[in-house]
Image (cartoon, rainbow, N blue to C red):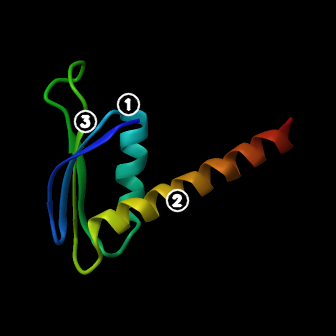
């Protein structure tokens, strides 16, 4: 997965992400769980062409830190799901 920063300011990050809609939706929703994030969304130029472009805006926290924290929480959620799946077998 490749992340390309398009624009970065103190409390704003605009980036291109080489990922599918499933991951992008999960990331977008997880970013909303951070009280310092007040904008989290992505768009594509066309549903089948190009990479999703994200916009993350924060209040006091760095958007890079918010993104890292969201990725860590997603990793933990996925590990918990995998554990539950193995226990259900």
Mark on residue 20?
Answer: 1
Residue 64 on image: x %, y %: 31, 63
Marks 2/3 in contact by CB < 8 Å: the verdict is no
Mark on residue 72?
Answer: 2
Residue 28 on image: x %, y %: 34, 51
User: What is the C-alpha distance between the residues marked 1 and 2?
Assistant: 19 Å
Residue at (24, 50) in percent of width and height: 41
Residue nearest the viewer, comparing 47 with 17: 17
- The total of numbered circles placed on residues is 3
Q: Look at the numbered disc 1 and give the secondary structure of its residue.
A: loop
User: What is the C-alpha distance between the residues marked 3 and 1?
Assistant: 8 Å
User: What is the C-alpha distance between the residues marked 2 and 3?
Assistant: 20 Å
Residue 16 on image: x %, y %: 23, 40
Q: The N terminus appears in which quarter of the rendering?
A: top left
Residue 60 on image: x %, y %: 25, 81
Residue at (37, 43) in percent of width and height: 25
> How packed is label 3: few (under 14 Cα within 10 Å), some, or many (20 or more)?
many
Quarter-of-image position of residue 82: top right
Q: Look at the numbered disc 2 and give the secondary structure of its residue.
A: helix
State the residue position of label 3: 52
Q: Left of 66 or right of it: where is 76?
A: right
Q: First in sequence, mark 2 or 3: give its number.
A: 3
Residue 22 drawn above or below residue 77: above
Q: First in sequence, mark 3 or 1: give its number.
A: 1
């Amino acid at each position: 997965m490749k992340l390309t920063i398009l624009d970065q300011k103190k409390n704003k990050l605009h980036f291109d992400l080489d990922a599918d809609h499933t991951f992008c939706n999960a990331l977008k929703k997880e970013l909303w769980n951070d009280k310092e994030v007040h904008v989290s969304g992505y768009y594509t130029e066309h549903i089948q062409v190009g990479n999703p472009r994200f916009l993350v805006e924060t209040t006091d926290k760095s958007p890079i830190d918010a993104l890292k924290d969201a990725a860590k929480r997603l990793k933990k959620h996925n590990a918990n799901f995998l554990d539950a799946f193995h226990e259900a077998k």
